[in-house]
Amino acid sequence: MQWLFRPYHRQFQQPLQTQHGAWAVRSGVLLKLEDEERVAFGEITPLDWFGTETLTTALAFCAQWQATRVAGEVDRADSGDGLEAELAAIPDHLPACQFGFGMLLEQWFYPQPERSPESQPKHSIAYLLPTGARAIAHLSQLTPPINDSSPCFKWKIGVATWADELAWFRQVMAALPPGARVRLDANGGLSWDAACAWLAVCADYPAVEFLEQPLAPNSVREMQQLGDRYPTPIALDESVATVRQLEQCLTAGWRGVVVIKAAIAGSPQRLRQVCQRYQPDIVWSSVFETAIARDYLLSRLIPSLTPQPRTLGFGTEHWFADAASSGRSPQALWETL
Ligand SMILES: [Mg+2]
């Protein structure tokens, strides 16, 4: 049996502007476990400005894991016990590693028969618009119309002045295709007053599906108050970055939507347990992972929890310079990325 890992770097076509600054390159680590009979892949997608470990820390952990495991230790005979013991050894400050190894070992110990692309579950996907005024021109150039009766778009806010953004927002709403919905994402960048101002405007636009993370991550109680006061639903994202934080918010009585970036939330097995217990209203979201992590999410994790999920926050592949990579097999991605 052979265990391998390698870093990858994917350039965005243009840097993604977020409340945390510009993001130009998505870096991560691919994991591979194989013997004569089978192969499993995993992926670590750190997002340190979102609170995960850095790429350097993840690579150091992989090197340590490789150095301290003798080949026989990860063996089919260990089955479920082996899986749990391996995963329990990964500390909570490495949530992206917990996910990467969690998906790798789950698929290693519990392989599923390969499915043809036609038999994969079909999901509708939210389309991430460029930030700021560029979204308006982008929407007007969308041809042919998106093949979806209720297309869903996501737009970042909290990145310019209120006056500019309000004017752009009204133009974005006017430029939407018929039946479309919009998710606004503030990445925790609004003050209480700014959040109230946005929600007062959104009240006139039922096409706003929700306002995502208006306030700082630790302001969950205030965000519950916003959700109770205005008609537009509030979604938590940064506040529920890890399984532990998600569980804390749900036990504290959070009643709104939760955006789960499973690839950086920690162990997918623990995430499954928490979601089965509390049944939250979930939007599954991407952290610009490759098809390796995405296929695990779409074909294993998500169907096991939300058979008919809200529109997925996965409409991100067109952001990459190498967008053609999306259709490749795990082995092809391993060889080419
Ligand atoms: Mg968000």
Image: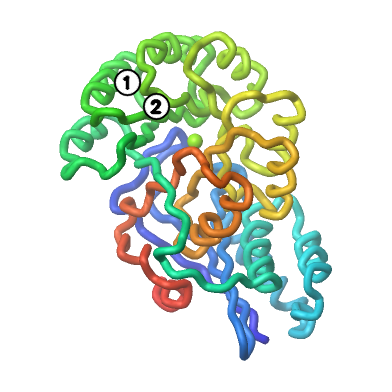
* Circle 1: element type: helix
- Tell which of 299 and 140 is nearer to you: 299
Q: Is residue 55 above or below residue 42?
A: above
Q: Is mark 1 within 8 Å of ligand 1?
A: no
- Tell which of 155 and 207 is nearer to you: 207
Q: Residue furthest bottom?
A: 36
The amino acid type found where label 1 is placed reads Glu
Left or right: residue 136 compared with residue 80: left
Crowd around label 1: few <14 · some 14–19 · many ≥20 (10 Å): some
Residue depicted at x 57% and y 60%: 44
| Mark 1 and mark 2 residues within 8 Å of each other at the beta carbon | yes
Q: Quadrant of the N terminus?
A: bottom right
> Residue 165: which numbered mark, if any?
1
Q: Quadrant of residue 152?
A: top left
Left or right: residue 144 compared with residue 195: left
Identify the residue under disc 2: 157
Q: Quadrant of residue 174?
A: top left
